[in-house]
Amino acid sequence: MAKDIESEVRNIISEIEEKAADGNYIYRGEPEWYEQVSSSLWRQLESTFTVHDKIDYDKIQESHLRNVRQYGENHPPDDFELASKLQHVGGETNLIDFTTDHLVALFFACDGSHKKPGRVILLKQTEQIRNKYKIKEPHHPPHRVAAQKSVFVQHPNGVIEEDDIEEIICIRPSFKQPILTHLREKECIYTQKIYNDLQGYIKHQEIHHEAYSAYRRGQLARFYGVMRTSIDGINLADAAIVLLNTAIELNPLFVEAYFERAHAYWLKEDSVDFDIDKVIEDFNRAIELNPDHALTHYARGKAYRDKGCDDRAIEDLNRAIKLDPGDAFAYTERGKAYRDKGCNARAINDFERAIELGDNSVRAHLEAAQTRRESEGADEVESVN
């Protein structure tokens, strides 16, 4: 079944590439089929005016940009460059986002509205179309615009006319998640790369607002669960797991939700149904989705140590320390794993390094002192023998 899905994903990508092979195209991905391919300014005014073809949205944008120039300094003198920056931070403009990369458009077509079909729109850049829609790329794009390989289209009417659209590729809801997985694993196109700044983070929260809402409530339940088991008879660990299940169902690539759910499972370590493997499985998934997150490697290393897998724990803690050499707690945890294996000299070095870096907890000092005593005792036994 997995091979069939992967084959279908490749077919969708091939279809886009084949249709675009005979010309110079730009692409737009939409997570659902909107009535019009339109600018944010057009959508803002849609409920106010009914006869859109009599409104010059470019003129409205010019007036809007004059107001923008009254705020702040060092704005680019060119109206298009200013409009592209305004678009980047979520302001209403008459620009319509396209991209020169069909895979980026495919990402946008799949990232959101998971129960609705998405689409990839192909616009052929003939001389007539370029002049009609004033297709331009910004000269000094912000990082996110550059990452998305953005190109902007604008028409005085605020929309792209249907007859000018060359092709539309439909993306069925059931294929959105497999396509996103393929793009991440095979093409290195994923959320953190596409939304690579603070505005991008906020924008992604808006797109996946239901998933983020469930995640935040699950996170809060988990935080309270550290301090107490239940509130008003509700088990906080179970409540957190239910909410985080919802967040993951709504967005199966939600890295933070897997990280939080692993810790929610961990809260149940004194329960009869506790399963450390569930904790590790969620950390595994979080690391698959974001392999360079030091804290997740630290947490999984701690989980492996709890399971008694000290070698696996040390591997993860080595990775955590490589990614974040200043993490005192990773040294403390690795010191415990080394001590469990009988490598007392290495353990003492890690405990001392942890204390140097700021883990001045009583536990860290006790761990170091205990390991020194054990090491000295072993030396005495060896000398007597």
Image (spheres, rainbow, N blue to C red):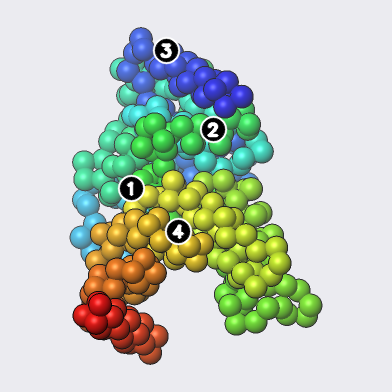
The amino acid beneath tag 3 is: Glu
N-terminal-most mark, 3 or 4: 3
Q: Label 4 to label 1, Cα distance in Å?
A: 41 Å
Please give the label number shown on residue 144.
Answer: 1
* In the rendered image, the vertical position of residue 360 relative to residue 236, given as above or below: below
Query: Which residue is nearer to you in this view: 302 or 199?
Result: 302
- For label 3, the residue is 18
Location of mark 4 (residue): 309
Verify CB contact (< 8 Å) between mark 2 and mark 4.
no
Q: Which is nearer the eye, 69 or 26?
A: 26
SS assignment at label 2 = helix
Mark 4 residue element:
loop
Instruction: Determine whether label 1 and label 2 are within 8 Å by CB.
Output: no
Q: Dot 1: few (<14), some (14–19), or many (≥20) neighbours within 10 Å?
A: some
**Spatial CA span between label 1 and label 2:** 24 Å
Identity of the residue drawn at 22% across and 52% down: 76
Q: Which residue is mark 2?
A: 178
How far apart, in angstroms, are the residues tagged by discs 2 and 4? 33 Å
Q: Residue furthest front?
A: 385
Query: Which quadrant would the N terminus be assigned to in this image?
Result: top right
Residue pictured at 79% horizontal, 77% vertical: 233
